[in-house]
Image: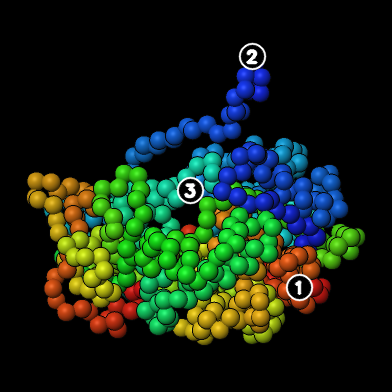
Amino acid sequence: MAERCAVIGAGQTKHAAKREDVSIAGLVREAAERALEDAAMDWGDIDAVVIGKAPDMFEGVMMPELYLAPALGAVGKPMVRVHTAGSVGGSTAIVAAHLVTSGVHRRVLTVAFEKQSDSDAMWALSVPQPFSAPLLAGAGGYFAPIIRAYMRRSGAPDHIGIVVAVKDRKQALKNPYAHLHIEDISFEMVRDSIMLWDPIRYLETCPSSDGAAAMVLADEDCAAASPRRPAWVHGMAMRSEPTMFAGRDQVNPQAGRDCAADVYAQAGITDPRSQIDVAEVYVPFSWYEPMWLENLGFAPDGEGWKLTDSGATALDGGDIPWNCSGGVLSSNPIGASGMLRFLEVALQVRGQAGAHQVDGVRRALGHAYGGGSQFFSMWVLGTEKP
Amino acid sequence: MTDATSTGQEPVAIMESPIHVDYRFTAGLAQSRFLKGLSQGRFLGQRCPRCHKVYVPPRGSCPTDGVPTTDEVELSNQGTVTTYCVVNVPFQGQSIEIPYICAQILLDGANLAFMGLIQEIAADQVRMGMRVEAVWVPPEELGPTMASVRHFRPTGEPDADYESFKEYL
């Protein structure tokens, strides 16, 4: 990395099933204004805008970034759209950070969004193909067999998915921006919810949300002039792999392991569990917590579920809290979901997470994945200048 | 013009405008062979000349080695359920009664599983490793589409050993 880069502003919307009070433009502007306010900046201070969202089919608006330029103060400025399926929020932030580390720009606004209520993302993901049977029934139908394979391979007991679903929803109660606030969430409530795609229960899945996230990224001089503590980028990486190839490990994808190894090497991390204080990891179905604990090197292969079961990943009493914000299980504006993971760790590093703040955070991991577990983006932020 | 408030009506916040897209799909050489095979009641795959893995449906090239897969292989009508889920979600255009089993099926001789429907067995009786066979539509209904395979059903053979398919998960 040539130039240093830091997060100096962060903003998000209140996420909800339907944000009928705003258009897409109003939604992204809400998050961007909050990020600018946090950075004590105005629209004119921004050099470039990098925006991301999931496939255009999700709202049925082709290339929405074109019409969003005025709402984001991007008229007459460079504007870039990033597109890497569900991981896009993470990779959008990384592209924006690269514009700073490369020395091209000094202050970059990055934004990601989804307005799921404008369309039907679940069925936009299940378009009929001429050479395969029309069986998929949304993302859950794709991931459920992979989760079953994980359960078989690791010998994990059935209740692990329930433990994660309860933990993340309880943590969401401490995050005013979270979509789901299920006050009486309990083990029994999740256990007794309908099996949508056996082994995935209804309450073990993420909601469909409207929402946006935005951050201001800046170089060293701008960060020094910023009124609040910067969160420094210690490492960032993206990886991808094909959806299908013989010998592919769908449970523990190579691209995810490679991406983690790259970002850890940049950040000088050799033992993630002891060296990372808090993580926001893309867990849209509860079983993905133990699966990613292994993929990201927090637990040996086959033992991620033991970490979850021990309470290690809980905000309340865990040594490596995951998804203190409530995670994707509590808010899922798809295109923004990855950026929210990246943004939430910036809040943790800057001490701005409020009721879901972990004490003494020095280093944090933000993670996103997308497609058929084939696109990965991650960054590590820290309080110290790298 | 009168605005919504003066007429006492709610303002229009959302307008539904369904989008319908028809597209012409060019299958290419490898998938054309596969689709023609389906119209004859056969599964045709292709083998990579370098790693010798068999792909069905074939993609025309090996994603790992990046070379054309020119060697055609006819696969068995039988295979193994590597993993599966029970779908309980009703959806648009659904022709199958829920709950149904959506399974990853590894045909004998293939190195990649594909998704298929399991029928003729209760949903709670399906297992990883279960042996299944394709049930084709009657010969006069066969065509260049996956719909030529009506579903898969249990063969009644003993389940495959986990070790034999664990590399395909």
Residue beneath disc 1: A382
Tag 1: Cα neighbours inside 10 Å, few (<14), some, or many (≥20)? many
- The subunit letter for the residue under badge 1 reads A
At numbered mark 2, what does the secondary structure look like: helix, strand or loop? loop
The residue indicated by pointer 3 is A121
- Assess disc 3: are there few (<14), some (14-19) or many (≥20) residues with their C-alpha within 10 Å of its C-alpha: many
At mark 3, the secondary structure is helix
Q: Which residue is mark 2?
A: B1
Residue type, numbered disc 1: Gly
* Front disc: 1 or 2: 2
From what the image shows, is residue A90 above or below residue A359? above
Discs 3 and 2 share one subunit: no
What subunit carries mark 3? A
Q: Are marks 1 and 2 on the same chain?
A: no
Q: Residue placed farthest to the left in the image?
A: B139
Q: Nearer the viewer, residue B93 or A316?
A: A316
Q: How far is the residue under mark 3 from the one under mark 1?
A: 35 Å
Mark-to-mark CA distance, 1 and 2: 57 Å
Work out which quarter of the rendered image holds the C terminus of chain A and state it. Answer: bottom right
- Whole-percent x and y of residue A229? 84, 66
- Which residue is drawn at the image coordinates 72% and 46% (left, top)? A30
Can residue A237 be seen at all in this image of the molecule? no
Relative to A154, say whether A247 is above or below.
Answer: above
Q: Callout 2, which amino acid?
A: Met
